[in-house]
């Protein structure tokens, strides 16, 4: 049976197993969706006395008030959806169907096997599709079967994240530098969203498995006007122009796995804005 067929059967079953405790080496995700320490300080800053306004004039909400004043009070605009091709890690990719999945040949146990697959799905947005924000709901599917064929205990592992590239002509400006690399953006904002991490010890001959569907909702978003200015160094004018331009979002996946007999991973994502 091809692993794609096994994925389909698993999706119908919708079986969810309890996740293991968070590993000690887990780190905070570095993406625009997760607020940084400096942004959190603003949320807890003591509010200054409100300025005096003319009677009947309401003050616009601030960052301290609502966290995201750019999108405050605006209607939600649905922007589309995509589902990635599945990524399969197994000892033999001979029967893999390249039109349905990306197959990675696994390293022998107990070595780690890494994957980094790009362009598993795309969404093309026209200019002015959203005003100041791209938000998301993301649902990954994890299917992994571990087996320890060794004579000693060893660590089983599966870690996967969504890698997302946003192509936008505003980022073609060579004077704009990506703070994560120190190099020009080259037209693309690259980011990642953590989706699943599991590490545990298997005894000799022991097997284990996990079939998991779960959803992650938007916090600060894939990208926003505020983060373009505060985190990526764009001017207010450039940040506004960013959302006036057409853009392409390209979805990939990266991760590591160990002691797997096979593992499969894909995700669906729906975008919305303001």
Image: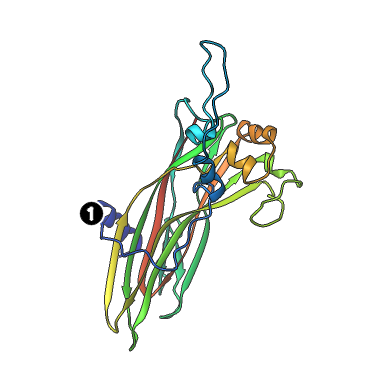
The reply, left or right, for residue 51 in relation to residue 208 is right
Total labels drawn: 1
| Horizontal and vertical percent position of residue 25 | 45, 68
Q: Residue at x 54, y 27 (%)?
A: 49
Q: Count residues near mark 1 (Cα–Cα under 10 Å), then give few for <14, some for 14-19, many for 20+.
A: few
Pick whichever, 89 or 59, lies toward us. Answer: 59
**Res. 237 image quadrant:** top right
Name the colour scheme. Answer: rainbow
Q: Quick one: quadrant of the N terminus?
A: bottom left
Q: Is residue 223 above or below residue 253?
A: above
Instruction: Give the residue pinned by disc 1.
Output: 13
| Horizontal and vertical percent position of residue 67 | 50, 36
| Horizontal and vertical percent position of residue 82 | 44, 44
Pick whichever, 18 or 94, lies toward us. Answer: 18
| Residue projecting furthest to the right | 175
| Residue projecting furthest to the front | 49
Q: Is residue 45 above or below residue 91?
A: above
Find numbered disc 1 in the image and state the secondary structure of the residue it sits on.
Answer: helix
Q: Residue at x 27, y 71 (%)?
A: 208
Q: Is residue 20 above or below residue 72?
A: below
| Horizontal and vertical percent position of residue 206 | 27, 79
| Residue projecting furthest to the bottom | 151
Pick whichever, 267 or 159, lies toward us. Answer: 159
**Res. 156 image quadrant:** bottom left
Q: Residue at x 36, y 69 (%)?
A: 262
């Amino acid at each position: 049976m091809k692993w794609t067929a096994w994925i389909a059967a698993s999706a119908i079953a919708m079986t969810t197993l309890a996740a293991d405790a968070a590993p000690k080496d887990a780190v905070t995700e570095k993406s625009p969706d997760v607020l940084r320490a400096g942004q959190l300080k603003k949320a807890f800053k003591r509010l200054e006395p409100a300025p005096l306004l003319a009677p009947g004039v309401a003050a616009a909400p601030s960052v301290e008030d609502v966290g995201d004043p750019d999108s405050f009070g605006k209607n939600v605009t649905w922007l589309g959806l995509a589902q990635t091709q599945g990524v399969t890690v197994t000892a033999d990719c001979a029967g893999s169907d390249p039109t349905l999945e990306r197959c990675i040949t696994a390293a022998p146990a107990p070595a780690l096997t890494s994957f980094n697959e790009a362009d598993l799905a795309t969404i093309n947005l026209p200019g002015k599709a959203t005003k100041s924000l791209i938000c998301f709901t993301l649902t990954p599917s994890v299917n992994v079967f571990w087996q320890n064929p060794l004579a000693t205990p060893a660590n089983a592992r599966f870690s996967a994240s969504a890698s997302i590239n946003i192509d936008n002509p505003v980022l073609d400006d060579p004077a704009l530098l990506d703070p994560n690399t120190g190099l020009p953006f080259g037209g693309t904002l690259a980011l990642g969203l953590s989706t699943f991490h599991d590490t545990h010890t298997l005894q000799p001959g022991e097997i284990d498995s996990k079939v998991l569907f779960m959803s992650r909702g938007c916090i600060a978003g894939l990208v926003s006007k505020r983060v373009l200015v505060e985190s990526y160094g764009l001017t207010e004018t450039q940040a506004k122009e960013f959302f006036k331009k057409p853009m392409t979002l390209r979805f990939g996946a990266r991760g590591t796995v160990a002691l797997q007999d096979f593992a499969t991973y894909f995700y669906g994502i729906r975008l919305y804005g303001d």
